Amino acid sequence: MTGAVRVGTRRSPLARIQAEGVRMRLARLAPATHFRLVPLDASGDRDRSLGGSPDFTDALDRALRRGEIDLAVHSAKDL
C-alpha cells in the first residue's frame, strides 16, 4: 500500500477522539506508515430522529466498500 492509510470515523467529537487514539496506536506499531483520519457524515448524525446502529455506521460501511477508506473506527456500543 502506498500513501497514507485512511482511517474512517464519524465527525462527532467523541468519534474523532476515539479514532485519533487508534490512529496513534497504529502509528506506534508501524512508524514508517502514515495514518490519516477521514471524518465522514453518517445519516444518524444528520438526522438525530433516526437513532439506529445502521444510521451511524452507514457512511463508514459505504466508504469501505467503495475503497475511500482503508479501515473504520466506530464505538462497539453502537454496533
Image (cartoon, rainbow, N blue to C red):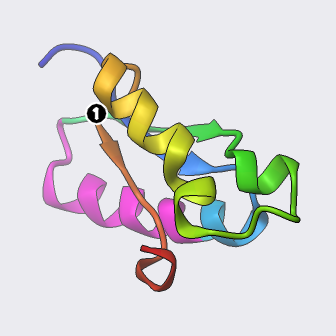
- Give the quarter of the figure containing the C terminus: bottom left
Which element is circle 1 on?
A: loop
* In this rendering, position of residue 67 left or right of residue 74: left
Q: Looking at the image, is 79 positioned above or below residue 12?
A: below
Q: Amino acid at mark 1?
A: Asp
Q: Nearer the viewer, residue 20 or 14?
A: 14
Please state the horizontal and vertical placement of residue 14, each as a whole percent of the image: 69, 72
Q: How many marks?
A: 1
Range of residues picked out in magenta: 18-32
Q: Looking at the image, is 14 positioned above or below residue 11?
A: below
Q: Residue furthest top?
A: 2
State the residue at coordinates (30%, 27%): 65
Helix, strand or loop: magenta stretch: helix
Q: Quadrant of residue 76?
A: bottom left
Disc 1 target residue: 70
Q: Quadrant of residue 51?
A: bottom right
State the residue at coordinates (40%, 20%): 68
Mark 1 neighbour density, 10 Å: few (under 14) some (14–19) many (20 or more):
some
State the residue at coordinates (87%, 53%): 47
State the residue at coordinates (12%, 19%): 1
Q: Nearer the viewer, residue 26 or 64?
A: 64
* In this rendering, position of residue 34 left or right of residue 75: left
66 in the magenta segment: no
